[in-house]
Image (spheres, rainbow, N blue to C red):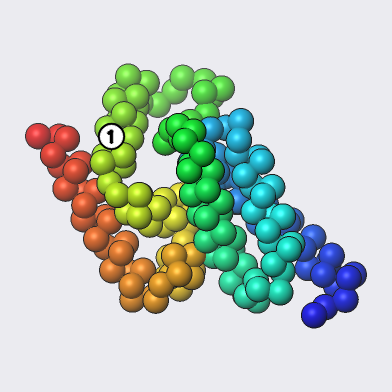
Amino acid sequence: MRSDSADQAWFDAVFTEHAAQVHRYFLRRAPIDDAEDLAAEVLAITWRRRADVPAGNVLPWLYRTAGYVLANYRRKNRPVPVVIDEDLDEPATGPDPATLTSDADAIRLALMQLSPRDREVLMLNAWEGLSGSQLAKALGISRGGAAAALSRARLRLAQLWDAELV
């Protein structure tokens, strides 16, 4: 085990490098009012279990822990909407907002029809930027298993999306 000062320095570095990513993870999956508390819970677990955090794979470990924290949160029977990150303060330029709204609705509908596992695989890949071994570690499966899970989830999403457009 590291010394207390080394542990504190390690945690400070983990916090500085990854706290915002963990917070964004929850902003995309939980009510905005709860995202900060959920992220804080993951970081508290990280401190308590610091000896279990694999060197060089901190972010996938954090995402996996965040998945467990989110599952526990959802068990409390609180509704959790799927949130698409939209900056409403930006001036109206670009595509017609009505088109964006209908696209966002279609995306939400397609995502909600997927299994929770498929949704998580896609969100970890698309929103959190994990792929390959990082995705595998976050999901707790082999790299080949992660690639297969991502491929299957993408296929099911494409099938749902095509069905929506028909």
Judged from this view, the residue extending furthest toward the front is 76
Where residue 106 sits, quadrant-wise, is: top left
| Residue 85 seen anywhere in this rendered image of the structure | no
Left or right of residue 4: residue 72:
left
Q: Nearer the viewer, residue 78 or 139?
A: 78
Residue 5 image offset from top left, x and y in percent: 90, 70
- Residue 59 drawn above or below residue 116: below
Judged from this view, the residue extending furthest toward the bottom is 1
Residue 11 image offset from top left, x and y in percent: 77, 63
Q: Which residue is mark 1?
A: 109
Query: What amino acid is found at the position of numbered circle 1 in the picture?
Result: Leu
- Residue 88 drawn above or below residue 110: above
Mark 1 is surrounded, within 10 Å at the Cα level, by few (under 14), some (14 to 19) or many (20 or more) other residues, namely some
Q: Nearer the viewer, residue 126 or 93?
A: 126
Left or right of residue 11: residue 138:
left
Where residue 132 sits, quadrant-wise, is: bottom left
Quadrant assignment for the C terminus: top left
Which residue shows up at 52% across the image and 48% down it?
72
Which residue shows up at 52% across the image and 29% down it?
87
